[in-house]
Image: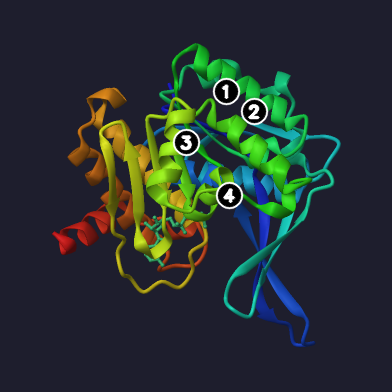
């Protein structure tokens, strides 16, 4: 029995690492991919997890497989492609400190996952099935994602969705919007950033944008992450805002993934259906997720920055 199963992209992020003696740019190879970051957070908090996806039969693919295993994520659903290489992305730091991504994915193994390669039984035995939008940018991975979503729905597995817009990966922004909205049809728990909310709804106001999605889809909760400002939520029982934690932030890579992993962990700890969750419980879950994500910004990278449960509790106690 595995509690949380995620399907999605798994790739190498090359992040800037200074200059060589010759003055040429150096890059560090880091494991990348939002769904795996979510699972690594859950696994760190002792939740059982499994990953479904595809990497190349190359050194980067082996490195990613080992990384998942080292982080106690089950890899029975991770396939090695014989035909294509592991997807690569280069991260460039812009002058204003913002990051831009350049993907080497034409095609990369992550988008070559085929529907018959999805372990349907693994999906159907889970308590939560998690996905993002980057496995839906191209075929055959889009059909594979939809297959897993139908399988999860059939068995009433709770579905969590983090759209994670990366404009460069889509043929067009209208395709991105359409596909993200298609993904929302399956979601129970939606985590979305304020920019993505505006992108998908055309509405900047958080109350109105989240209401639009809530009415259009059968969502149980919408979590709109606001960076350092924490998270706005819409729930069957109303809306609210949980402020973030001020910490010594050095790198926000994966903050949203740590947030979502921590939030899902809190839900599983409750061991009740969504309908039984009260507003103050939801707020405590979000507060915990804010604390975990904030701590995650005090170290470099995503997976290496996941704090322990004790560290998160200490930060929470400090606020109380
Ligand atoms: P990403 O796509 O980079 O994974 P995101 O855009 O989905 O992230 P953000 O809104 O940047 O998500 O951040 C998610 C959560 O992380 C926030 O809700 C907040 O709890 C925490 N967080 C992010 N940045 C900071 C920061 N600078 N200081 C404290 N907490 C932060």
Element at badge 1? helix
Please name the residue shown 47% across and 12% down the image: 155
Real-space Cα distance between discs 1 and 4? 23 Å
Left or right: 275 as drawn, with respect to 217:
left
Return the disc, 1 or 4, that comes first in the chain's sequence: 1
Query: Which numbered marker is on residue 199?
Result: 4
Q: Specify whether tag 2 is near ligand 1 (CB below 8 Å).
A: no
- Residue at 16 percent of width and 59 percent of height: 317
Which quadrant holds residue 269? top left
Q: What distance separates the C-alpha of mark 2 from that of mark 1?
A: 6 Å
- Judging from the image, the colouring scheme is rainbow
Q: Secondary structure at mark 2?
A: helix
Q: State if disc 1 and disc 2 touch (CB < 8 Å).
A: yes
- The numbered dot on residue 149 is 1
Residue that label 2 marks: 145
Q: Earlier in the sequence, mark 4 or mark 2?
A: 2
Distance CA(mark 2)–CA(mark 3): 21 Å
Rendered location of residue 231, percent (x, y):
35, 53
Where is 80 relative to 21, above or below? above
Q: Which residue is mark 3?
A: 213
Residue 218 visible here: yes
> Compared to 282, does 121 lie above or below?
above
Quarter of the image where one finds residue 111: top right
Crowdedness of circle 3 by 10 Å Cα count: few (<14), some, many (20+)?
many
């Amino acid at each position: 029995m595995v509690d949380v199963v995620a399907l999605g992209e798994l790739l190498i992020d090359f992040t800037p690492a200074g200059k060589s003696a010759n003055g040429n740019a150096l890059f560090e190879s880091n494991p990348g991919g939002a769904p795996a970051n979510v699972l690594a957070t859950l696994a760190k908090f002792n939740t059982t997890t499994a990953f479904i996806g595809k990497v190349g039969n190359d050194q980067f693919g082996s490195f990613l497989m080992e990384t998942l295993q080292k982080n106690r994520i089950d890899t029975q659903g991770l396939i090695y492609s014989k035909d294509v290489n592991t997807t690569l992305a280069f991260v460039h730091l812009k002058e204003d400190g913002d990051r831009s991504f350049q993907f080497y994915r034409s095609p990369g193994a992550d988008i070559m996952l085929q529907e018959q390669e999805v372990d349907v039984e693994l999906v159907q035995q889970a308590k939560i099935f998690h996905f993002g939008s980057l496995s839906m940018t191209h075929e055959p991975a889009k059909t594979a994602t939809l297959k897993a979503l139908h399988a999860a729905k059939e068995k009433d597995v709770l579905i969590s969705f983090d759209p994670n817009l990366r404009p460069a990966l889509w043929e067009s922004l209208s395709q991105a919007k359409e596909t993200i909205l298609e993904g929302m049809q399956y979601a129970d728990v939606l985590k979305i950033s304020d920019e993505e909310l505006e992108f998908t709804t055309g509405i900047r106001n958080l109350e109105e944008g989240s209401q639009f999605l809530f009415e259009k889809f059968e969502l149980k909760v919408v979590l709109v992450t606001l960076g350092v400002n924490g998270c706005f939520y819409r729930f069957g029982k109303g809306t609210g805002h949980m402020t973030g934690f001020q910490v010594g932030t050095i790198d926000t890579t994966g903050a949203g993934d740590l947030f979502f992993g921590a939030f899902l962990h809190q839900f599983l700890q409750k061991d009740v259906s969504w309908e039984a969750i009260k507003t103050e419980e939801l707020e405590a879950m979000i507060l915990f997720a804010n604390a975990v994500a904030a701590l995650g910004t005090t170290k470099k990278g995503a997976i290496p920055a996941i704090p322990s449960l004790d560290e998160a509790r200490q930060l929470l106690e400090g606020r109380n």
